[in-house]
Image (spheres, grey):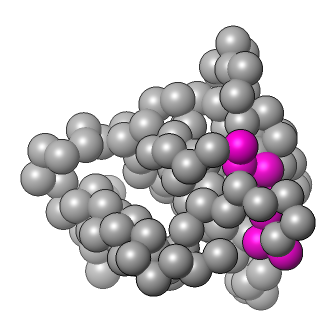
Amino acid sequence: VLEKKSGVDLVQLHESFGAVTVDGNSKNYIGAEVTSNNTAELSAIAFGLQWILEQKFEKPSKVVFRYDSEYAAKSVQGHYKNSKKNLKLIAYTQGLLTKARRRGNNFAFQHVKGHAGNHWNERADLLARRGCMKGIY
């Protein structure tokens, strides 16, 4: 249990890490043009959505994505319209979000300040570094 909110237990269901793939010929390519903190956050949201879509939950879920990249979260939600980079990755991730919502899942996006001691943000940064070191493509 991560925390209790309004009498409901919030639990962490999944944790993973990996590298951003920019090679369009790779089976792991999902549209990233460059490796950056923004493409990493966009890719993390995409992989989280892929995982949710692969699960056989008994009923729709409420999912909270906590992020420190406002660019990534706003791009996925369609609130950031001026992006000139990562268009394929953004479109891919938006498609996954739409598909997951059609299954009845409810999504919230919550900003957390990066590098400010937030336990889960620090955990995400650790996993990001681990993915870079392992070079999982």
* Outermost residue to the top: 82
Q: Residue at x 71, y 43 (%)?
A: 33
Q: Residue at x 62, y 66 (%)?
A: 48
Q: Quadrant of residue 20?
A: bottom right
Judging depth in this view, the residue of 124 and 110 nearest the camera is 124
In the picture, measured across the screen, residue 63 lies left or right of residue 97, that is left
Q: Is residue 103 visible?
A: no
Q: Residue at x 30, y 80 (%)?
A: 1
Q: Residue at x 45, y 82 (%)?
A: 134
Q: Looking at the figure, which quarter contains the C terminus?
A: bottom right
* Outermost residue to the left: 117
Please tell me whether residue 86 is drawn above or below residue 122 in the rendered image: above
Residue 32: say if magenta.
yes
Q: Quadrant of residue 102?
A: bottom right
Residue 94: say if magenta.
no
Residues in magenta?
27-33
Please tell me whether residue 46 is drawn above or below residue 52 in the rendered image: above
Characterize the magenta stretch by its predominant secondary structure. Answer: loop
Please tell me whether residue 106 is drawn above or below residue 113 in the rendered image: below
Query: Where in the figure is residue 2, as x and y percent of width and height?
Result: 28, 73
In the picture, measured across the screen, residue 103 lies left or right of residue 112, that is right
Query: Where in the figure is residue 14, as x and y percent of width and height?
Result: 50, 81
Query: Where in the figure is residue 10, as x and y percent of width and height?
Result: 38, 70
Q: Is residue 63 visible?
A: yes
Total labels: the figure holds: 0
Query: Where in the figure is residue 13, as x and y percent of width and height?
Result: 49, 81
